[in-house]
Image (cartoon, coloured by chain):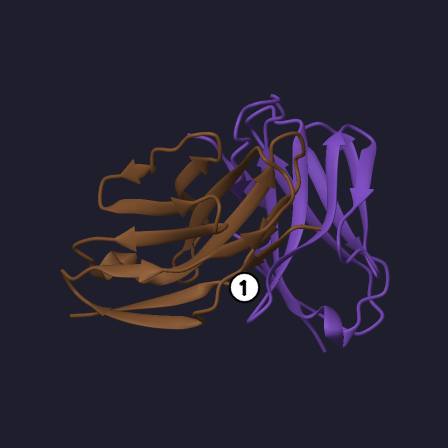
Chain colours: A brown, B purple
Protein backbone atom coordinates (compact mmCIF):
# COMPACT_ATOMS: atom_id res chain seq x y z
CA UNK A 1 0.00 0.00 0.00
CA UNK A 2 1.07 3.53 -0.60
CA UNK A 3 2.30 5.52 2.39
CA UNK A 4 2.15 9.24 2.98
CA UNK A 5 4.43 10.84 5.57
CA UNK A 6 4.10 14.23 7.18
CA UNK A 7 7.09 14.65 9.43
CA UNK A 8 6.00 17.90 11.10
CA UNK A 9 3.26 17.23 13.69
CA UNK A 10 2.96 20.94 14.50
CA UNK A 11 4.21 24.22 13.10
CA UNK A 12 3.79 27.89 13.87
CA UNK A 13 3.94 30.93 11.65
CA UNK A 14 3.57 34.64 12.23
CA UNK A 15 0.64 36.32 10.54
CA UNK A 16 1.58 37.65 7.08
CA UNK A 17 4.63 35.40 6.83
CA UNK A 18 5.21 32.31 4.71
CA UNK A 19 5.26 28.72 5.89
CA UNK A 20 5.96 25.42 4.15
CA UNK A 21 4.46 22.11 5.18
CA UNK A 22 6.26 18.95 4.08
CA UNK A 23 4.90 15.72 2.69
CA UNK A 24 6.58 12.69 1.20
CA UNK A 25 4.96 9.61 -0.24
CA UNK A 26 5.90 6.21 -1.46
CA UNK A 27 4.47 4.71 -4.63
CA UNK A 28 5.42 2.57 -7.59
CA UNK A 29 2.76 4.13 -9.81
CA UNK A 30 3.61 6.70 -12.44
CA UNK A 31 0.23 8.40 -12.61
CA UNK A 32 -1.52 9.62 -9.50
CA UNK A 33 -2.97 12.63 -7.73
CA UNK A 34 -1.81 14.47 -4.68
CA UNK A 35 -3.90 16.68 -2.45
CA UNK A 36 -3.67 18.98 0.51
CA UNK A 37 -6.74 19.10 2.73
CA UNK A 38 -7.43 21.60 5.50
CA UNK A 39 -9.41 20.81 8.64
CA UNK A 40 -10.17 23.91 10.74
CA UNK A 41 -11.01 23.32 14.41
CA UNK A 42 -14.42 21.64 14.74
CA UNK A 43 -15.13 22.17 11.07
CA UNK A 44 -15.27 20.09 8.01
CA UNK A 45 -12.30 19.06 5.96
CA UNK A 46 -11.95 20.92 2.68
CA UNK A 47 -9.68 20.64 -0.32
CA UNK A 48 -6.93 23.24 -0.50
CA UNK A 49 -5.08 22.23 -3.61
CA UNK A 50 -4.49 19.26 -5.89
CA UNK A 51 -1.68 18.19 -8.22
CA UNK A 52 -1.76 15.71 -11.07
CA UNK A 53 1.49 13.77 -11.22
CA UNK A 54 1.69 13.99 -15.01
CA UNK A 55 1.77 17.78 -14.85
CA UNK A 56 5.19 19.26 -14.35
CA UNK A 57 3.84 22.66 -13.42
CA UNK A 58 3.25 23.19 -9.73
CA UNK A 59 -0.35 23.90 -8.77
CA UNK A 60 -1.29 27.26 -7.30
CA UNK A 61 -4.47 28.47 -5.66
CA UNK A 62 -4.24 32.10 -4.54
CA UNK A 63 -1.91 32.13 -1.49
CA UNK A 64 -1.41 28.36 -1.61
CA UNK A 65 1.12 26.69 -3.85
CA UNK A 66 2.89 23.37 -3.97
CA UNK A 67 6.39 22.24 -4.70
CA UNK A 68 5.98 18.90 -6.41
CA UNK A 69 9.18 16.91 -6.86
CA UNK A 70 8.15 13.67 -8.56
CA UNK A 71 11.53 11.97 -8.52
CA UNK A 72 11.98 12.74 -4.85
CA UNK A 73 8.34 11.85 -4.11
CA UNK A 74 7.92 15.08 -2.28
CA UNK A 75 4.87 17.35 -2.21
CA UNK A 76 5.16 20.39 0.03
CA UNK A 77 2.56 23.10 0.59
CA UNK A 78 3.56 26.74 0.78
CA UNK A 79 1.21 29.23 2.38
CA UNK A 80 2.09 32.84 1.66
CA UNK A 81 0.87 35.86 3.61
CA UNK A 82 -0.48 33.60 6.36
CA UNK A 83 -3.78 34.61 7.90
CA UNK A 84 -5.40 33.71 11.20
CA UNK A 85 -7.98 31.69 9.30
CA UNK A 86 -5.24 29.42 8.00
CA UNK A 87 -4.86 27.88 11.45
CA UNK A 88 -5.93 24.26 11.03
CA UNK A 89 -4.81 20.69 10.62
CA UNK A 90 -3.42 20.07 7.17
CA UNK A 91 -3.43 16.62 5.64
CA UNK A 92 -1.51 15.46 2.62
CA UNK A 93 -3.23 12.76 0.59
CA UNK A 94 -2.44 10.46 -2.31
CA UNK A 95 -4.78 8.80 -4.80
CA UNK A 96 -3.76 6.41 -7.54
CA UNK A 97 -4.91 7.19 -11.06
CA UNK A 98 -7.10 4.15 -11.48
CA UNK A 99 -8.18 3.60 -7.95
CA UNK A 100 -10.55 5.38 -5.67
CA UNK A 101 -8.71 4.82 -2.42
CA UNK A 102 -7.02 7.78 -0.80
CA UNK A 103 -4.07 7.53 1.54
CA UNK A 104 -3.58 10.25 4.12
CA UNK A 105 -0.64 11.47 6.12
CA UNK A 106 -0.84 11.93 9.88
CA UNK A 107 -1.40 15.66 9.59
CA UNK A 108 0.37 18.90 10.52
CA UNK A 109 -1.22 21.30 12.95
CA UNK A 110 -0.57 24.87 11.84
CA UNK A 111 -0.74 27.66 14.38
CA UNK A 112 -0.87 31.26 13.17
CA UNK A 113 0.34 33.90 15.61
CA UNK A 114 -1.08 37.42 15.43
CA UNK B 1 -23.57 23.65 -2.81
CA UNK B 2 -22.37 20.10 -2.56
CA UNK B 3 -23.09 18.44 0.69
CA UNK B 4 -22.18 15.41 2.77
CA UNK B 5 -24.27 15.19 5.91
CA UNK B 6 -23.52 13.04 8.91
CA UNK B 7 -26.46 12.35 11.16
CA UNK B 8 -24.83 13.01 14.53
CA UNK B 9 -21.99 15.36 15.45
CA UNK B 10 -21.56 13.94 18.95
CA UNK B 11 -22.56 10.58 20.40
CA UNK B 12 -21.96 8.94 23.74
CA UNK B 13 -22.58 5.20 23.95
CA UNK B 14 -21.95 2.40 26.40
CA UNK B 15 -19.69 -0.57 25.82
CA UNK B 16 -21.58 -3.31 24.02
CA UNK B 17 -24.19 -1.05 22.45
CA UNK B 18 -24.92 -1.18 18.75
CA UNK B 19 -24.10 2.12 17.08
CA UNK B 20 -25.27 3.46 13.73
CA UNK B 21 -23.55 6.35 12.00
CA UNK B 22 -25.42 7.66 9.00
CA UNK B 23 -24.08 9.61 6.06
CA UNK B 24 -25.97 11.13 3.15
CA UNK B 25 -24.57 12.88 0.08
CA UNK B 26 -26.45 14.92 -2.49
CA UNK B 27 -23.91 14.86 -5.32
CA UNK B 28 -24.93 11.57 -6.95
CA UNK B 29 -21.46 10.21 -6.20
CA UNK B 30 -20.71 6.56 -6.78
CA UNK B 31 -18.04 6.28 -4.12
CA UNK B 32 -18.54 6.69 -0.41
CA UNK B 33 -16.04 6.20 2.39
CA UNK B 34 -15.86 5.91 6.14
CA UNK B 35 -12.66 7.06 7.82
CA UNK B 36 -11.56 7.08 11.39
CA UNK B 37 -9.46 10.02 12.57
CA UNK B 38 -7.21 9.75 15.61
CA UNK B 39 -4.50 12.18 16.75
CA UNK B 40 -1.12 11.32 15.27
CA UNK B 41 -2.58 8.64 13.03
CA UNK B 42 -4.29 10.76 10.42
CA UNK B 43 -7.25 9.29 8.59
CA UNK B 44 -7.57 5.55 8.32
CA UNK B 45 -10.01 3.95 5.93
CA UNK B 46 -12.55 1.63 7.53
CA UNK B 47 -14.76 0.71 4.55
CA UNK B 48 -15.67 2.13 1.21
CA UNK B 49 -18.40 1.52 -1.33
CA UNK B 50 -18.25 2.11 -5.06
CA UNK B 51 -21.86 1.28 -5.80
CA UNK B 52 -25.14 0.42 -4.16
CA UNK B 53 -24.86 -2.80 -2.16
CA UNK B 54 -21.14 -2.98 -2.95
CA UNK B 55 -18.53 -2.57 -0.26
CA UNK B 56 -14.87 -3.18 0.29
CA UNK B 57 -12.81 -3.38 3.43
CA UNK B 58 -10.36 -0.64 4.07
CA UNK B 59 -7.34 -0.79 6.33
CA UNK B 60 -9.09 -1.16 9.70
CA UNK B 61 -12.46 -2.92 9.17
CA UNK B 62 -12.40 -5.04 12.32
CA UNK B 63 -15.33 -4.31 14.60
CA UNK B 64 -17.23 -2.41 11.91
CA UNK B 65 -19.71 -3.15 9.17
CA UNK B 66 -21.40 -0.97 6.57
CA UNK B 67 -24.59 -0.77 4.60
CA UNK B 68 -25.34 0.95 1.31
CA UNK B 69 -28.91 0.31 0.27
CA UNK B 70 -29.29 3.57 -1.65
CA UNK B 71 -26.74 5.50 -3.65
CA UNK B 72 -26.91 8.58 -1.48
CA UNK B 73 -26.67 6.86 1.91
CA UNK B 74 -23.78 4.99 3.51
CA UNK B 75 -24.08 3.73 7.07
CA UNK B 76 -21.35 2.63 9.45
CA UNK B 77 -22.33 0.09 12.10
CA UNK B 78 -20.53 -0.82 15.27
CA UNK B 79 -22.14 -4.11 16.25
CA UNK B 80 -20.85 -4.01 19.82
CA UNK B 81 -19.10 -0.76 20.68
CA UNK B 82 -15.86 -0.91 22.60
CA UNK B 83 -13.86 1.83 24.30
CA UNK B 84 -11.12 1.59 21.68
CA UNK B 85 -13.65 2.72 19.10
CA UNK B 86 -13.85 6.13 20.72
CA UNK B 87 -12.83 8.39 17.87
CA UNK B 88 -13.84 10.89 15.22
CA UNK B 89 -15.56 9.28 12.25
CA UNK B 90 -15.54 11.02 8.90
CA UNK B 91 -17.72 10.19 5.95
CA UNK B 92 -16.68 11.23 2.45
CA UNK B 93 -17.83 10.80 -1.11
CA UNK B 94 -16.32 11.16 -4.57
CA UNK B 95 -17.20 10.70 -8.20
CA UNK B 96 -15.69 7.82 -10.11
CA UNK B 97 -14.78 9.16 -13.51
CA UNK B 98 -11.51 7.53 -14.46
CA UNK B 99 -8.91 10.16 -15.11
CA UNK B 100 -10.60 12.69 -12.88
CA UNK B 101 -9.05 13.56 -9.58
CA UNK B 102 -12.07 12.19 -7.75
CA UNK B 103 -11.80 14.82 -5.08
CA UNK B 104 -13.16 13.74 -1.72
CA UNK B 105 -15.98 15.72 -0.15
CA UNK B 106 -16.25 15.32 3.58
CA UNK B 107 -18.97 15.50 6.16
CA UNK B 108 -18.49 17.41 9.39
CA UNK B 109 -17.59 14.29 11.34
CA UNK B 110 -19.17 12.32 14.15
CA UNK B 111 -17.32 12.26 17.45
CA UNK B 112 -18.12 9.02 19.21
CA UNK B 113 -17.32 8.37 22.86
CA UNK B 114 -17.74 4.84 24.17
CA UNK B 115 -17.87 4.57 27.96
How far across and down, in percent of the image, does residue B101 sit? 52, 30
Task: Answer whether residue B17 is visible to the viewer in this image.
Answer: yes
Instruction: Tell me which chain the residue with mark 1 is part of.
Output: A
How far across and down, in percent of the image, does residue A51 sit? 43, 37
Residue toward you, B47 or B65: B47
Q: Is residue A94 placed above or below B8 in the rendered structure?
A: above
Instruction: Residue at 28% x, 72% y: name it.
Output: A12
Instruction: Residue at 34% x, 33% y: name it.
Output: A57
Q: Secondary structure at mark 1?
A: loop
Would you say A44 lies left or right of A1 here? left
Specify the quadrant of the image occupied by residue B14.
bottom right
Residue toward you, B16 or A34: A34
How far across and down, in percent of the image, does residue A64 sit? 28, 46
According to the image, label 1 marks what residue? A106
Instruction: Residue at 20% x, 58% y: name it.
Output: A82
Instruction: Residue at 54% x, 25% y: name it.
Output: B100
Amino acid sequence: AQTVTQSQPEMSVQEAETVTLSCTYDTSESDYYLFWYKQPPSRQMILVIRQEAYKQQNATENRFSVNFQKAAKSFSLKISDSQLGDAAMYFCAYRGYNFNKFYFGSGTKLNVKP
Amino acid sequence: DVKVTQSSRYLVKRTGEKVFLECVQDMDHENMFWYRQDPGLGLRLIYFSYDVKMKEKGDIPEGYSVSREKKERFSLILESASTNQTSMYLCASSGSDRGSSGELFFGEGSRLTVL
